[in-house]
Image (cartoon, grey):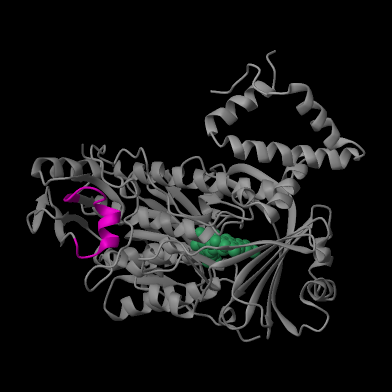
Amino acid sequence: MTKIFETPLYPYTRSPDQDVSRIRHPVVVIGAGPVGLAAAIDLAQQDVPVIVLDDNDKVSFGSRAICFAKRPLEILDRLGCGDPMVNKGVTWNTGKVFFGKRETYKFDLQADAGHKRPAFINLQQYYLEEYLVNRVRELEAEGKPIEIRGRNKVSAIARHDDQVTLEIDTPEGPYNLEAEWLIACDGANSPTRRMLGFDFVGRIFEDNFLIADVIMEADFPSERWFWFDPPFNKGQSALLHKQPDGVWRIDLQLGWDIDIEREKRPENVIPRLRAMLGEDARFDLEWVSIYTFQCRRMENFRHGRVLFAGDSAHQVSPFGARGANSGLQDTDNLIWKLKLVLDGKAPDTLLDTYDAERVYGAEENILNSSRSTDFITPKSDISRIFRDAVLDLAEQHEFARPLVNSGRLSVPCVYDGSSLNTPDETTLPEDTRPGAPALDAPLADFWLLDALGNHFQLLAIGTDAPDFLDVDGIRVETLRVAPGESPTFDDRYLGEKSSAIYLMRPDQHVAARWVEYDEAAVRNAVLRATAQA
Amino acid sequence: MLITTPNIPDADGFYAELLDLHESHTKEESDALNARLVLLLANHIGDRKVLSEAITAAKLKK
Ligand SMILES: Cc1cc2nc3c(=O)[nH]c(=O)nc-3n(C[C@H](O)[C@H](O)[C@H](O)COP(=O)(O)OP(=O)(O)OC[C@H]3O[C@@H](n4cnc5c(N)ncnc54)[C@H](O)[C@@H]3O)c2cc1C
């Protein structure tokens, strides 16, 4: 196989930092996985110098995450990587559920129209990482302060009040670095977390899954098929999902007491796949792995000057595709806050709200993914009885279908109750309340979300506000939309009202809203959204 | 509010029908029938608060 995941994308080169005793950087990111790369791109786009260290020099091996939801695609748009993702990805919206030998029902995910991005696409994680690396190269070419250092393995870390010190191993020996801020995106086994001695607690699920990506010429449609107790995998579950390039993701539950090394051998994998795909299916194995999973998180994602994001901070079961999707929401939340703190425009307590908001997000993901797992793998006789009852009823009665849980696909987190929100005193639509991510909508000649992000903005609808406002050095720009321009926009942002003012955060979440412009209220809300009031 | 006072007309007839449902079924089939019945009834009630009250009432007071 000569796959992208076998080509070094950021080979080791010697850095001048290796020839001086100790040099200090404003931000160092550990890990060039999807989350570390997203963090670095976000920083560099805003001219914050950033170094990414990775002990490897390639993208992730095998496809790992395959399902990317609308909100992460919107975040990738802001980072300049949305188009290649959506152009390459497989768009799907039909799912089928099978129980035993029978097709129980079919569902359509087609959410409400009027969004630039689809509800989901399927795409191998190595493509996402490749596009992110391409974007890093593009930023470098523009002269932005970003650098990836391959085969730079962090081997020791020490925390101080005003900095973090790192010891790094390279093929040419070790060197030291200092960072004002360290973002640890070094994955589920996070060496940073281990070296600093932080807990990572939660629930282990006693089950094994065989995950195989096969290349096959087949006319299965672009749908997600999920089997409970199929004839080809008795008493267990199975999943079939399409990726680009004729690659199919197959996930087979194997149970707990198995010999992992034995099950992974092609001579044992192939008969299982034949039983599922049919005797005459022709396919090649691209990648096989067996995994068990855990739902767990760190108690806190911020420890002074060390910030954890992505799998290093939290881990969920793959059902619901929340791993990579939620990691991108972490950096989306973190980077604008870190930028304001670095610029001296907000106190460092703003970073505590990264912890609060993303712990809340992680809890939501862990809850959803644990519930899916409990449905897919009943833990007792009675839970299996109810599970099977739901599946039997679902074939004949629509009411039971929402109870079928083969993974609740990732939807964005609404930061209800966040200290950054200004309490809402309006009767504007619920879905765009403070804490919610802005809902996209088509405007006369652009998409709303393409015009939002990276700084604070006022959205002035049917009422006016000044072009811009300076709130203690924080610039707030106004985007005006006329009612009637887009009925979808009006539904999402006005409801029954004829005017509204929304204060948007740099991560496109709503911070506050009113029906009329009031400068004092806006100023207060900006201070509040930056932990200054 | 969960109704906990008599509310089923023809109580004896209902009870007999419930037992008939389980007549000549194995324990396993009966368990499945009961589970389906609970789910159908729960959906019919549909009121999340009443369902929680019923779940609590089913545990009996200590
Ligand atoms: C088998 C498998 C299947 C999965 N399936 C799905 C799925 O279907 N859907 C989904 O959403 N998610 C899935 N995931 C999870 C998804 O892949 C992760 O959530 C995602 O990769 C997390 O990104 P990350 O950047 O936080 O960490 P990672 O992608 O793990 O990246 C961590 C990086 O840190 C680097 N690193 C580690 N230690 C050091 C060190 N000491 N010094 C320097 N660098 C270091 C590593 O080389 C790596 O590049 C799956 C994961 C696995 C393993």
**Closer to the camera, A177 or A460?**
A460
Is A495 included in the stretch rendered in magenta?
yes
Quarter occupied by the C terminus of chain A: top left
A157 up-or-down from B8: above or below: below
Residue A291: where, in percent of width, then height?
70, 60
Is A411 included in the stretch rendered in magenta?
no
Ligand 1: quadrant of the figure: bottom right
Quarter occupied by the N terminus of chain A: bottom right
**Closer to the camera, A268 or A490?**
A490
How many numbered tags mark residues here?
0
Residue found 24% across the figure and 64% down from its top = A486
**Closer to the camera, A489 or A186?**
A489
Q: Is residue A186 visible?
A: no
Residue found 21% across the figure and 50% down from its top = A503
View extreme (left): residue: A466
Residue A461: where, in percent of width, then height?
16, 55
Q: Is residue A487 left or right of residue A155?
A: left
Q: Is residue A241 left or right of residue A429?
A: right
A197 up-or-down from A248: above or below: above
Q: Is residue A142 visible?
A: yes
Q: Which residues are magenta?
A: A484-501
Residue B58 in which image quadrant: top right
Q: Is residue B19 left or right of residue A17?
A: right
A293 up-or-down from A18: above or below: above
Residue A123: where, in percent of width, then height?
53, 73
Residue A399: where, in percent of width, then height?
61, 48
